[in-house]
Image: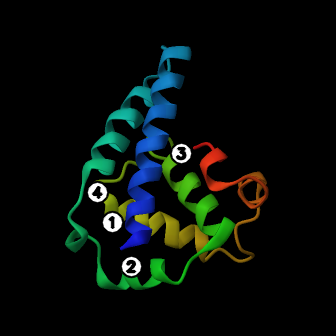
Amino acid sequence: MIHLDFVRTKCASTAMWRASLATKYPHDIRNGAAYGLLKSLAALTDNSAISAETKAKLATYHGAEFVAATQTACREVCFRYEPQGLQEVCDRIVELMEQVPPLQNADVRLAAVLPAAEVRS
């Protein structure tokens, strides 16, 4: 499923971003913890660990809002929540996508303007 592959890819890129922040801010241990957790989440390949309901919801999402929600969910790892698996990251993405009004922040605007490859985690 392409959406789960995107979530894993975003976990991996956010892990690398957190690694750079861990170097820059060595006293904030959350960055190192987030790096390790995101790296392990990115390596998970078992799609059966994600509920059918969550897969169905993710399949309906697209565009800049989905990119921004995925970025936010990954950035929040070890800062807002500590997911036990990829299901919890996907649940957070669904939660962000279902916010009323829809998620509108600088990340959405940035994702809408820049090609996906240039949007940083």
Q: Amino acid at mark 3?
A: Arg
- SS assignment at label 1: helix
Question: In the image, is residue 40 above or below residue 22?
Answer: below
Determine the CA span between mark 4 and mark 2. 13 Å
User: Closest to the observer: 18 or 26?
Assistant: 18
Q: Amino acid at mark 2?
A: Thr
Residue that numbered label 1 is attached to: 87
Q: Amino acid at mark 1?
A: Gln
Question: In the image, is residue 15 above or below residue 77?
Answer: above
Q: Earlier in the sequence, mark 2 or mark 3?
A: 2
Question: In the image, is residue 14 above or below residue 20?
Answer: below
**Quarter of the picture holding the C terminus:** top right
Q: Are marks 4 and 1 in contact (CB under 8 Å)?
A: yes
Determine the CA span between mark 2 and mark 3. 20 Å
Q: Are marks 2 and 3 in contact (CB under 8 Å)?
A: no
Determine the CA span between mark 4 and mark 1. 5 Å
Residue that numbered label 4 is attached to: 85
Determine the CA span between mark 1 and mark 2. 8 Å
Q: Earlier in the sequence, mark 1 or mark 2?
A: 2
Q: Earlier in the sequence, mark 3 or mark 1?
A: 3
Determine the CA span between mark 4 and mark 3. 15 Å
Q: Which residue: 65% across, 71% down? A: 63
Neighbourhood count class around disc 4 (C-alpha, 10 Å): few under 14, some 14–19, many 20 upward: some
Q: Are marks 3 and 1 in contact (CB under 8 Å)?
A: no
